[in-house]
Image (cartoon, rainbow, N blue to C red):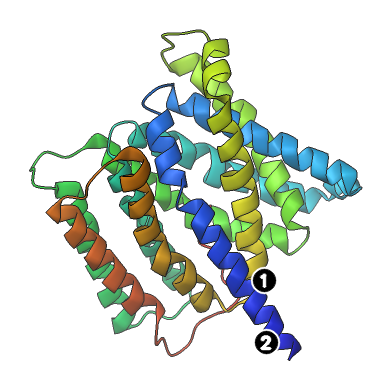
């Protein structure tokens, strides 16, 4: 009975994460067209770090920051999940549609299965290869979208997702020696000043930084609290209670459809036939890839950033 209740709790946690994370492409698609994208990534990440610092102080967990091994792993997580992907994905999103962002973020799944198969975390099977090929075809349909020209933004998003599974290997190591709040705090409090510094050095500002903060702080707060903090807490805690393949199926199976709905609702973007075809292929490929495998390693790293 206890196992059943823990499993049900894990399902609810991952489902909650899916709802929050489905808003991620919409938020960044809207804000990165109005303000420097890396600046938004940095300020949102800073909000998360501040919120988690307050939480750790209230719960008297700041002493756990003395764990050197956890800090080292968390620094790698900051680089590979916060800094590099944020630069690529946020800039890419500013150059493409919210729908493309929603769908192309699923490229992370393909990179994850390829990497984990090569590292022998998961077995390479014909079924997995077939599913990955179908996902790639779906991604190609979205990138093509009726035009032979290649959208730089789409390519940047795909490249950004490449780093997530690498960073998640270090995240799994960090979670083996520390808690989820500590990991999230370190990765965000390290990533935030670096992203803001990169923005100040390389991005073009048509207004002072204070203007963007004053006018877009609600989006920064929402992104930092709900998407970067609560969403990730739900995901990691859900993963502790579920087999990896089941958690992925819950999250990935529903995320694209919900994200497309939010994109239409808030950005008023209507999917093109190519995007519908790409969405359908990606969904079919993911289902083929993550179901009916003969052997799955349940301790593999979480897929989301």
Left-right relation of 288 to 55 = left
CB-based contact (under 8 Å), mark 2 and mark 1: no
When asked about the image quadrant of residue 5, the answer is bottom right
Query: Count the marks: how many?
Result: 2
- Which residue is at the front of the view, 11 or 240? 11
Residue 185 in the figure: left or right of residue 23: right
Return the residue nearer the eye: 234 or 76. 234
Q: Position of residue 256 (x, y in %)?
A: 36, 59
Q: Can you identify the residue that label 1 sits on? A: 240
Where residue 133 sits, quadrant-wise, is: bottom left
- Quarter of the image where the N terminus is located: bottom right
Q: Secondary structure at mark 2?
A: helix
Residue farthest along the front direction in this orientation: 265
Q: CA distance from mark 2 to mark 1?
A: 14 Å
* Label 1, residues with CA under 10 Å away: few <14, some 14-19, many ≥20: some
Check the image and report above or below for 298 versus 204: below
Whether residue 144 is situated above or below residue 33 in the rendered picture: below
Residue 88: tell me if it is visible: no
Q: Give residue 28's position: percent from left, percent from top.
A: 43, 36
From the top left corner, tell me how far across and down residue 191 is, in percent.
Answer: 61, 35
Residue 182 x/y as whole percent: 76, 50
According to the picture, the residue beneath numbered tag 2 turns out to be 4
Tell me the SS state at disc 1. helix
In percent of the image, x 72 and y 43: which residue is there? 185
**Viewer-nearest residue: 155 or 27:** 27
Residue 133 in view of the camera: yes
Looking at the image, residue 258 sits to the left or right of residue 9; the answer is left
Mark earlier in primary sequence (2, 1): 2
For residue 91, which numbered disc appears in the image? none
Residue at 46%, 69% in the rendered image: 116
């Amino acid at each position: 009975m206890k196992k059943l209740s823990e499993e049900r709790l894990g399902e609810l946690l991952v489902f909650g994460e899916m709802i929050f994370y489905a808003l991620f492409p919409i938020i960044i698609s809207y804000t990165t067209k109005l303000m420097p994208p890396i600046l938004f990534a940095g300020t949102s990440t800073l909000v998360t770090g501040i919120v988690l610092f307050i939480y750790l102080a209230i719960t008297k967990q700041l002493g756990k920051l003395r764990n050197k091994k956890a800090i080292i792993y968390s620094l790698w997580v900051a680089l590979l999940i916060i800094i590099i992907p944020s630069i690529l994905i946020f800039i890419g999103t500013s150059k493409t549609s919210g729908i493309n962002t929603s769908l192309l973020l699923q490229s992370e799944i393909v990179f994850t299965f390829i990497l984990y198969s090569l590292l022998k975390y998961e077995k390479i099977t014909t079924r997995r290869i077939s599913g990955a090929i179908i996902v790639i075809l779906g991604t190609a349909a979205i990138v093509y979208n009726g035009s032979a020209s290649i959208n730089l933004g789409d390519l940047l998003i795909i490249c950004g997702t490449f780093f997530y599974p690498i960073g998640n290997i270090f995240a799994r190591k960090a979670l083996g020696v520390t808690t989820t709040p500590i990991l999230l705090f370190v990765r965000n409090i390290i990533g935030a000043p670096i992203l803001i510094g990169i923005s100040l050095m390389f991005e073009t500002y048509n207004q002072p930084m204070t203007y963007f903060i004053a006018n877009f702080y609600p989006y920064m707060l929402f992104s930092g609290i709900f998407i970067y903090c609560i969403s990730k807490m739900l995901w990691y805690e859900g993963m502790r209670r579920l087999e990896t393949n089941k958690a992925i199926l819950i999250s990935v199976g529903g995320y694209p459809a919900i994200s497309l709905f939010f994109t239409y609702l808030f950005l008023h973007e209507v999917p093109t036939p190519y995007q519908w075809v790409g969405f359908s292929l990606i969904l079919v490929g993911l289902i083929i890839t993550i179901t009916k495998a003969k052997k799955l390693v349940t301790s593999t790293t979480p897929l989301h950033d």
